[in-house]
Image (cartoon, grey):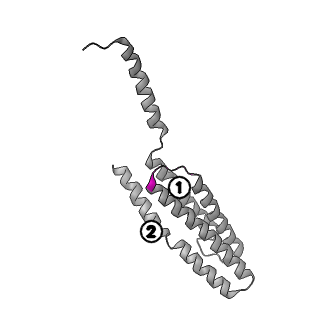
Amino acid sequence: MHFPTRYFAFLPITAIVSLSLVSCAESKISQCNKIIQVANEAVSEAKAVTNQGQASDPRAMLKAADAMEKASQEMKLIEVKDAKLQDYQAGFINMYRDTSQATRDFVNAFGKKDRSAAETALDKLQQATTPEKQLVEEINTYCSSEVAQ
């Protein structure tokens, strides 16, 4: 079978366009890594400012709240195409936002010596952080299964 020379010109162009499209699309692994990196940084920063969670200083707690708010904002900036990763991303965003707000509410109530408000804020803080373990396990499982494929 004889191919005219004009088809040979299209072959490299088609290959270049195809490779460009593939390389422009960020892989799921890359997206996983970005989400996990923000999550790890948030935990590390919160632990650092609260002395591994042992500090009871309101200023340290506010710094931890700032770290959670920062993580929420950073997580929002990650462009994610995969629907499942978008769910995990939203889970982290909500958890960090709620944790930050509950921490601020607690510090505020503690400063006012409002025991009832402080207890309410602690309950909200516990509720905000409850999904962390499951969220981390699920995204780790999902992302590690992508590596195996």
Q: Is residue 15 above or below residue 108?
A: above
Which residue is depicted at the point 54% across and 49% down?
A: 79
Q: Which residue is mark 1?
A: 37
Q: Which residue is mark 2?
A: 134
Residue 96, position as x, y percentages in the image = 58, 65
Q: Amino acid at mark 2?
A: Gln
Q: Secondary structure at mark 1?
A: helix
Q: Is residue 43 above or below residue 124?
A: above
| Type of secondary structure dominating the magenta stretch | loop
Q: Which residues are magenta?
A: 78-83
Judged left or right of residue 108, residue 52 is left
Which residue is depicted at the point 59% across and 76% down?
A: 125
Q: Quadrant of residue 58?
A: bottom right
Q: Amino acid at mark 1?
A: Gln
Which one is in front, 60 or 85? 85
Q: Is residue 132 above or below residue 1?
A: below
Count of numbered marks: 2
Which residue is depicted at the point 44% across and 49% down?
A: 29
Magenta stretch encompasses residue 82 = yes
Q: Quadrant of residue 98?
A: bottom right
Residue 44, position as x, y percentages in the image = 57, 63
